[in-house]
Amino acid sequence: MQEIALDAAINSIRVRFGSQALTRAAELPPPQPWPSRTPIDRLTGIGGLPHGRLTLLSGNGTCGKLTLALLLLAGATREFAHAMVIDTGSGFDPWTLTPFYPELGALTVVRAPALDLAGEAAIALAKAGAGFILLMGEIPEHALGPLESGANRSGTVIVGVVDAPGRAFAHASSLSVGFSRTDWIWERGQLVGLRATARCVKNRVAPPLGEAALEIRYALGARKLSDLPVQVVEVPRELTCESAVV
Amino acid sequence: MIGLWEEHVIAASEEALPFGVMPGMALRQAEHLCPQANFLPPDPESAAHLRELISSALYDLAPTVEVRVEGVAWLDVSEVVNPGESIREARRRLRAALGREPRLGLAPGLFSARLAAARARPGRLVQVDAAKTFLSSLSSHELPLDAEQLERLDLLGLRTLGAVAAIGPRELESQLGHAGRRAVLLARGLEPDQLTPWRPPLFTSAHRQFEEPVEDREAMLFVARALCGDLAAELGLRGAGAKQVCVRLRFESAEPEQREAVVRHPLSSAAELFGLIGSWIKEWQPRAPITELWIELPALEGAGRRQLRLWAGGDGASEEVTAALERLQERWGEHVVHKPRPALLSSPLPSQRFAG
């Protein structure tokens, strides 16, 4: 009886607001992930970042979101013909990417001091079918719809990095991972990295899978920066707690 | 055994071959050799359909593929980088399609390859390096001549292909006409014939008929996605892309509705096809429950550009991305797009680290 009433309610919503207003999880198209080979793959629930969707990495202050975004970007330069950075005034320096061994031939940076330019660039590149777009900030609300549809059509992987996303930006994302720093890592009196928790706060492509503890070690030392890769690894929860206690 | 009465055998099954039945021989003679065989009249339509299916299955294994209705398929592997791989895959596909092992022959030409395959055990390959040597000991009845011409060869004492090869083409031409000249060239392994390459038809379609008329849009999308997947698999096999897409809905008691569009760049993957067709179905307001969904791709063209996907998965056409960047530069200035190229990475001055 309950099922019949539920079906009737679902049908009435679809009749009034269109078939796309409400979709059963079982009817959702199978997500096509891009395996980024980072700890974030587990959090997405589909084994990688979804194609044609916006993934948000957010968190206040130094919490590892940009390091992870750079790691994703470097991976994208090796796997896609076009990896784009839309720099909305944060002064993206390609030099910060070198510890991740990028394929710089595939990297293009769009400097977009004006938000309209950022939005236009993101839409044009998503529609054209660029493999990967990294948004270094928010884009205007009116650009989010065309960006979503353009990316959906071409399968572009879009990753946005922001401290605290606005409502529209958060709404447009299909996957949102919140970062928060739990601890700094010191060795011999020197700051060498940080520990953070990455929590899946929104997931439209799979059931949310909770959180992961990350340990991020910066590339430090007397050698060239590019000689030492940055390490981003997922650590067992118990180990993190122990470390935190110590 | 397939053939018309009073005419010759077109094709014979594996079981008939040990009795000496061969395609090309008179049906009366075949009946005499194998009286217990079932004799079926030819069905040109089904044979052509089967030929198309086998051709499309083998199409991507070699630059030139020809399949003949008598049950012989040729693949020109002379320019294939790894011919062994192609032959293995051809064997696998034919076995899967026919349910029995094909006989395989590898030789420098069509005639010798066919004879080599005829001498192979099912699933095995007979490889011929020197065609003339291989052919010399075989019976002259292997030549594609009619019964009267073969009889004349016997009367002339030319019982092996080696004997036929030994005489001059003009001499046999004077006896048998043009066929005689061709017979000598074949017997010498000179292979006067060329393959007629099979080309895929420039049209394809897929459809689904519903047992009960469908009103649910989600169900339509589900079916459309599956059809797009089937079409994309076929396009992938052909290396083609769709330049035109047409979707037709049939109804129980109303005129069919259709929508079509010419696309700028050929669509070849399931995601690309469904991206367009799915958006049509989402906004379609059919006037009645749907009984049948047709997706037609009336114009196909080579999707050669899409080969870039082999190297960069997931990307669109490179020219489109470049064009989009150029449009941004035209509108907002050259400085907007920056392609960093390493210059002095160790420089303490950020401006010196990259050029471009």
Image (tube, rainbow, N blue to C red):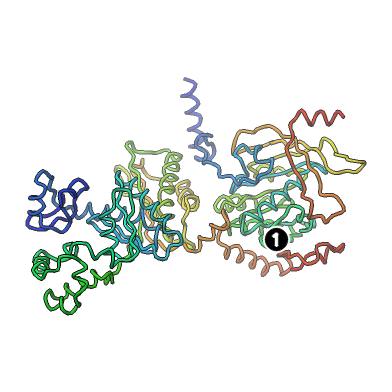
Q: Quadrant of the C terminus of chain B?
A: bottom right
The answer to which of B74 and B202 lies nearer the viewer is B74
Seen in the image, is B289 located left or right of residue A131? Answer: left
Q: Quadrant of residue A240?
A: top right
Element on which disc 1 rests = helix
Q: Amino acid at mark 1?
A: Leu
Of all chains, the one bearing label 1 is A
Q: Residue furthest top?
A: A1
Residue depicted at 68% across the width and 56% down the height: A119
**Residue B201 visible from this viewpoint:** no
Q: Which residue is mark 1?
A: A104
**Residue A38 visible from this viewpoint:** yes
The answer to which of B302 and B104 lies nearer the viewer is B104
Number of numbered discs overlaid on the protein picture? 1
Seen in the image, is B269 located left or right of residue A88? Answer: left
Q: Quick check: A179 above or below B4?
A: above
Residue depicted at 88% across the width and 40% down the height: A187
Seen in the image, is B204 located left or right of residue B267? Answer: left
The answer to which of B120 and B331 lies nearer the viewer is B120
Residue A155 x/y as whole percent: 57, 51
Residue B321 x/y as whole percent: 60, 62
